[in-house]
Amino acid sequence: MTHKIGRTVAESQPHWPPAPQRPQGAPNILVILFDDVGFSDFGCYGSPIATPAIDAVAGRGLRYTGFHTTAMCSTTRAALLTGRNHHSVGVGCLANFDSGYPGYRGKIAREAGTIAEMLRPHGYRNYMLGKWHVTPLTESGATGPFDGWPLGRGFDRYYGFMDAETDQYAPELVRDNTPVDPPVGAAGGFAAGYHLTADLVDQAIRYLADHVADNAATPWLTWLALGACHAPHQAPADLIAKYDAVFADGWDAERERRLARQIELGIVPAGTRLPARNDMVRAWAECSDGEKRLFTRLQAAYAAMLDHADQHIARLLGFLAAAGQLDDTLVVIMSDNGASQEGGPFGMVNAMGPYNLRRESIEEKIARIDDIGGPDTHSNFPLGWAMAANTPLRRYKQNTHGGGIRDPLVMAWSKGIAARGELRPQFCHASDLVPTLLDVVGVAPPRVINGVKQMPIEGTSFAPSLANPRARSKSKPQYFEMFGHRGLVQGGWKAVSFHPPGAPFDSDRWELYRLDRDFNEVDDLAAREPERLQAMIAEWWRQAERCKVLPLDDRFAPRFADNAKRFHGPRNRFVFHAGMGHVPTDVAPDVRNRTYTIEAEARIDGPATEGVLIAHGDMTGGYSLYVKDGRLCYDMNIGGEHHLVASDRPVPSGNRRLGVRMRRNQGRNLATLLIDGEAAGGFDTQHGFVSFISWSGLDIGRDRNSPVSHYEAPFAFTGTLRKVTVVMDDDQEIDAEKAAAAVLARE
Ligand SMILES: [Ca+2]
């Protein structure tokens, strides 16, 4: 029955199409996705880090011990959101580049709808908070395109960050499709107690409080992707201090304690042995006393960041309980990949320096020990602690051994999951989450979304294991691939190969493990079962072809360099007019390793006129051109080392052209300040932006949040700024290898 329309209302019959309805008994869904948290790091998986809120969710639900991811950020997110393999949907590697092959576009194909797009026809309202990182960063600017942003992929509201990471005290935030300042502005962010995790939870509570106020009967999906515990490891100082004593005896002792606890909890089978330390990890006993203090503090910052996140998760869950929503909500808590090796053997206090070839000596790191976790640091822990985080697994994030791809997964739903505090050993994969959620909701995936025919769901629902501890793991083979590292899990067996970057793929050595009896891949059966191994390798190639994994590609450097080159093309001139908003870093002028000129047109009202003309970056690195104490100043901040010059004469009043010419000459960088085109002082340094300017973007007329130079942000310009022009010469030399290392560390 539809409507009938006659000449008048009296002759007509109205009809109201039915609104989408919550499927019978379907829950709300809260996904809390951690970043770079290792297999053992939640308290309920064996660590001494305090995570009582997560442990409580586990206590009223399930912990999976065979959950697997894709070894990296963008890729796991693509699989989690779509229910397909990451290559199949076009995110075979990072969202930071498009390699020109279907499996490697850095953007989720429209044929692969997201869970938000799938639930929308069933009445769900979809809220996204935090890290997105499945849109090419070259599409993060003012002209998008926005079709790959959260609102373009089925979410109704969004508050978060687009890139791999962001500063927790001065984040690069987007609300819906627009960059915004964090609520506590300027340098007051850190001092005022601002932290991104707290802000994201505040916003999540706001979305849900709004939802309940407006229409509590409508189901919702809330996807909360924290910056924790990706680098930079930033957390309140008092929390960090608490963990010094916990980790003082080092990663070797810690790994043993965690394994014992895991066996006691049943997380790993009795009899599990620790593998040898990963390559390049020293015995704790061989580290100097200074190193021990430093490494302990770096680990304390990581632990505190997780502890801090747990406290805010408690707040969110407390809100849901108070709002009467918790019993009807399926809570899913997990990590996107194993703990990260990106801090290297010694860890980092401010990684921005080393990315630009400014060495951070062990003495400097130790001297800055009390800054770790604060607003002017970009810290990451050393390999030994990443190894302990992944206990008892081998290797790290980026690799396809367990340390890279085996992760915690906690699920609870008071009304729908009867189990309380039980374990589930089933093998499952990031791509299996969506079909599981669809099963729980009780709907099939749409065949067409927004007019686009959908590719099949590739994951397999593990919903049967929610009720049945002995449910079978999926029988379909599951492949893994990241930077040429490969793996295949099928029928309780795992074939895996580590790929040394640059080596021929055919020389990779494959290992074979009986995964269902050898939890952490210590007993290689390759020599004993060569036929099984060959069959699994052949299956790997079949899956690779089917899922767009090919061509195999281990290039770090050229992919990043090619992408930047293709995006910027021959463009060498940017004009920023007054009134412009924030420019994200990936679409700002690429002034790395090249000669450039910045010139602002401004009116100086008198000797008191001051403020920022243009700034790109934050306290950990970047550049700023500004007027202070009557002088024109340029600061090139390389990992906290300031190359700063003030003009040799005052800036005269009136309309002025105020600029800086930065010239590359035989590897050195020569700065010349320019007042109305006339030289007014400068500096000459070996340092410069080699591979990276900053995670923070660019503004004119102010320096938001976290100051690049020696002033209090935002240090807004008090004269009249008309425009700023950046012109770059054609002499750019990108050191591809170093550029890649930097960008990789961003993941
Ligand atoms: Ca990650």
Image (tube, rainbow, N blue to C red):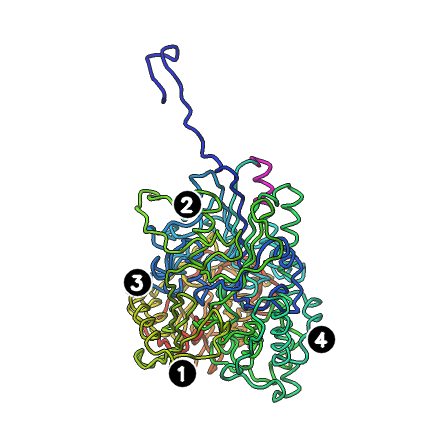
Instruction: Look at the magenta stretch and give its main secondary structure.
Output: helix
Q: Residues within 10 Å of mark 3 (few under 14, many from 20)?
A: many
Residue position for label 1:
667
Q: Nearer the viewer, mark 1 or mark 2?
A: 2
User: Whole-percent x and y of residue 523?
Assistant: 47, 79
Residue 247 occupies quadrant: bottom right
- Circle 4 SS class: loop
User: Whole-percent x and y of residue 293?
Assistant: 66, 81
- In three-dimensional space, the C-alpha distance between marks 3 and 1, rounded to whole angstroms, equals 41 Å
Residue position for label 2:
118
Q: Callout 2, which amino acid?
A: Met
Q: Residues within 10 Å of mark 4 (few under 14, many from 20)?
A: few
User: Whole-percent x and y of residue 106?
Assistant: 37, 61
Q: Callout 4, which amino acid?
A: Ala
Residue position for label 4:
245
Ligand 1 neighbours mark 3 (CB distance < 8 Å)? no
Q: Residues within 10 Å of mark 2 (few under 14, many from 20)?
A: many
Q: Which residues are magenta?
A: 206-216
Residue position for label 3:
548
- In three-dimensional space, the C-alpha distance between marks 4 and 3, rounded to whole angstroms, equals 48 Å
Q: In the picture shown, does residue 293 fall above or below 150?
A: below
Q: In the rendered structure, which disc, 4 or 3, sits on the residue that comes first in sequence?
A: 4
Q: Callout 3, which amino acid?
A: Lys
Q: In the rendered structure, which disc, 3 or 2, sits on the residue that comes first in sequence?
A: 2
Residue 545 occupies quadrant: bottom left
Task: Assess whether residue 211 is covered by the magenta stretch.
Answer: yes
Q: Who is closer to the viewer here, 409 or 141?
A: 409
Q: Is residue 350 visible?
A: no
Q: Who is closer to the viewer here, 204 or 50?
A: 50
Q: Who is closer to the viewer here, 55 or 92?
A: 55
- Circle 2 SS class: helix
